[in-house]
Amino acid sequence: MGKNIKPGQSSGQNGGIYQEIGPRGGRHESYSTIPDNHRAPPTTTPGCSWERVSRTPDSRR
């Protein structure tokens, strides 16, 4: 659905609610809210990434 970002990578203008995705595409139960232009937090296991589930509105818009 959304753009995948790796841990430590900036979200750019795509801030929102992200779900942890395993290296083979399996979904984990971990969620994180990442604001615009902030770095993604570490994942629970190596090789995982974050996929945006829904976009949150920016306070400047």
Image: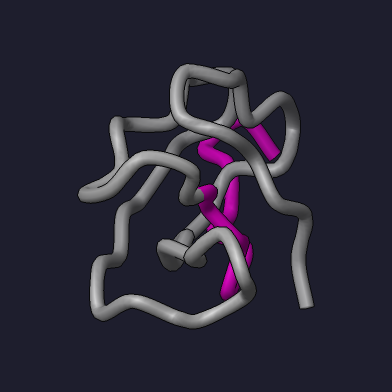
- Residue at the (46%, 29%) spot, across then down: 7
Q: Nearer the viewer, residue 42 or 55?
A: 42
Magenta-drawn segment: 49-61
Q: Is residue 3 above or below residue 53?
A: above
Using residue 33 as the reference point, say whether residue 18 is left or right of it.
Answer: right
Quadrant for the C terminus, please. top right
Q: Is residue 52 above or below residue 61?
A: below
Q: How many marks?
A: 0
- Residue at the (47%, 50%) spot, across then down: 48
Q: Is residue 52 magenta?
A: yes
Q: Quadrant of residue 55?
A: bottom right
Using residue 40 as the reference point, say whether residue 58 is left or right of it.
Answer: right
Q: Is residue 36 magenta?
A: no
Q: How is the image coloured?
A: one colour
Quadrant for the N terminus, please. bottom right
From the top left corner, tell me how far across and down residue 29 is, in percent.
25, 79
- Residue at the (58%, 30%) spot, across then down: 36
- Residue at the (30%, 65%) spot, across then down: 31
From the top left corner, tell me how far across and down residue 33 is, in percent.
35, 51
Q: Is residue 17 above or below residue 39?
A: below
Q: Is residue 32 above or below residue 61?
A: below
Q: Quadrant of residue 32?
A: bottom left
From the top left corner, tell me how far across and down residue 46 is, in percent.
36, 40
Q: Quadrant of residue 54?
A: bottom right
Q: Nearer the viewer, residue 8 or 60?
A: 8
Q: Nearer the viewer, residue 11 or 5?
A: 5
From the top left corner, tell me how far across and down residue 20 is, in percent.
42, 62
